Image (cartoon, rainbow, N blue to C red):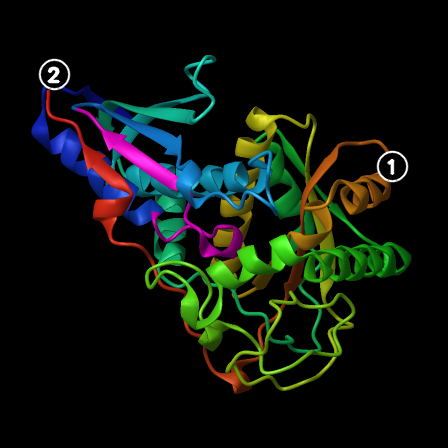
Amino acid sequence: MISDQLPPGDHAVADQLGAAAAVAARAPSIHNTQPWRWRIHASTADLYLDASRQLHVTDPDCRLATVSCGAALHHAQVALAAAGSATEVRLLPQPDNPLHLATITAIARARPVPDAQRLRQAIEVRHTDRRPPKQQPIPTDVMPLLQATAATHLSGLQPLDRDKVLELAAAITQAQADETADPATRRELDTWTGTDRHSGAGIPDANILTGPTSTTVPNRDFGHIGTLPVNDQHDDAATYAILYGYADDPRAWLRAGQALSDIWLATTAMNIALLPFSAAVEPPRTRELVNRLLIGIGYAQLAIRLAIPDPTQGDAPRTPRLPTTETIERVQP
């Protein structure tokens, strides 16, 4: 419920927008590239895609970078709603500037939203864990809830039956074989993983498994093994699904990122582990194979695995984040 309008030039508003942008830094991104940049004004926060952190070989059209920025946008929206700020969001506000992805405008003070506060707490614990989960299915009422969540972002979530999971696995295997065989892709992957990556970004060895797993869908092949111990068991009880859009353009990619964030935070709050799979949608050839699994209902943006985490394995470490000085700029009036 909106309580009162914001006075013009309220410095507290800009502070709150800046704090939300800092929270958004916890969002997931392809190879932890964190390809976003925020410009904070008196009452607006502008989100830009930072092309310097784009995967130019793996993601030449910025599809996955835009999905990543959509997740950061939703994280910021959650932080603002949880703090009691009513906002308006415009996607792609400058058609002549494709790097300007969104503008958040703070319009009024409001009561903090309880659901947003629950998701805000989930931001603090959400992380990617590539280890096999427990052999326990997720509750049957979870998928309809997540599909409804995706729909609020004009996106869809399609669960896969066993045969289609095997087709997804084949597509990911083919995509990763093609990418690891390509020298340019390997060089780019090496830039963002292991010990040679930027210290505040990328995926360190501590987040990469010590070896392959027996899971139905193969884990990401980073070209080398890491140091995250793995209890190698199967994931027959896991649910696989495809997050999709109704178009295949930057607006749909942004919305898919918002949906991914919303779904991931909701599952985190329910103690359900979400693992994203982007490999199959990276090369156009295998992306088309994944699109066929949707039988014409939309365009695949990501595949995800939903499962109950295995508490006996302990917590996987969280990936690092860039300092806010590299992702947030405060614009003086």
Label 2 CA crowd tier, 10 Å (few <14, some 14–19, many 20+): few
Numbered range of the magenta stretch: 25-41
The one of 290 and 256 positioned closer to us in this rendering: 290
User: Circle 2 sits on which residue?
Assistant: 8
Residue 295, numbered label: 1
The one of 306 and 176 positioned closer to us in this rendering: 176
Which residue type carries mark 2?
Answer: Pro
Q: Is 147 rendered above or below residue 107?
A: below
Q: As drawn, is 194 to the left or to the right of 7?
A: right
Q: Residue 83: image x %, image y %?
A: 25, 41
Label 1 CA crowd tier, 10 Å (few <14, some 14–19, many 20+): few
Can you tell which quarter of the image residue 235 is in? bottom right
Residue 258 visible in the displayed image: no
Which of the marked residues, 2 or 1, is nearer the chain's N terminus?
Answer: 2
The one of 197 and 99 positioned closer to us in this rendering: 197
Q: Determine the residue positioned at 11% across, 18% down.
A: 7
The one of 173 and 17 positioned closer to us in this rendering: 173
Q: Determine the residue positioned at 45% across, 12% down.
A: 96
Residue 83, numbered label: none
Q: Residue 232: image x %, image y %?
A: 68, 85
What separation in Å lies between label 2 and label 1 (alpha carbons)? Answer: 50 Å
Q: So how many labels did they put on this image?
A: 2
Q: Residue 261: image x %, image y %?
A: 49, 46
Q: Residue 10: image x %, image y %?
A: 9, 24
Q: Is 251 rendered above or below residue 162?
A: above
Q: Determine the residue positioned at 70% across, 56% down.
A: 182
Q: Determine the residue positioned at 60% across, 67% down.
A: 222
Q: Which quadrant of the rendered structure holds the N terminus?
A: top left
